[in-house]
Amino acid sequence: PSDFVFRLTQAEWKRLVGRIANSDRPENRSQIATGSQRHRDPRFPPYAFTEHGAIMAANVLNSPRAVQMSVFVVRAFVRLRQMIATHKKMTSKLAELERKVASHNTHISSLFEAIRRLMTQPEPRKRKIGFLVKERAAKYGRPEIRPRR
């Protein structure tokens, strides 16, 4: 079924071949059971098992080595799930921190703008040109009654 096995893309296949070519393992090829040219041709990427497909394939085989590899595969997939969960948590925390930093940046920039406005000296008021006389204001209303002497 398609949820148990899938075909690798060309990019995935090239990356996998590069890793296999760089490994120190000897080539694992039998002289008797060599695959056909189509199976060895790099134009045709291989199939890969999903988690459930690998467990199904391991359950079909019943040798001690197959059981050992089945346990290994299950542990590998469990560890992979844990790593993905950790990665999701870290991603959400990072996104939250980015939102906080963005809001802090806007607040800090507004604070700096307010400080700059306070630091600039206000321009002195321009005095009017001409002669200014300061007179006492006239008192209007009832006249004051002064006592006589």
Image (cartoon, rainbow, N blue to C red):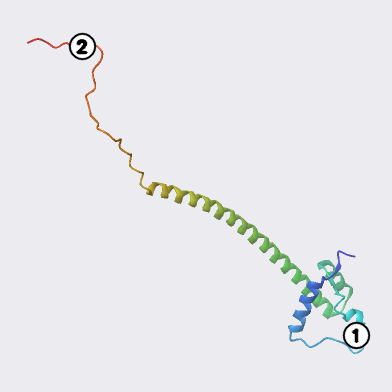
Q: Residue type at mark 1?
A: Thr
Q: Earlier in the sequence, mark 1 or mark 2?
A: 1
Seen at 45% across and 51% down, the residue is 112
Q: Residue type at mark 2?
A: Pro
25, 61: nearer the viewer: 25
Farthest residue to the front: give it. Answer: 130
85, 106: nearer the viewer: 106
Quadrant of residue 32 within the rendered picture: bottom right
Residue on which disc 2 sits: 143
Residue 44 badge: none
Mark in the foreground, 1 or 2: 2
Residue 34 badge: 1
Q: How many other residues sit within 10 Å of disc 2, few (<14), some (14-19) or many (≥20)? A: few
Farthest residue to the left: give it. Answer: 149
Seen at 65% across and 60% down, the residue is 91
Instruction: Report x, y in % for residue 78.
Output: 74, 67
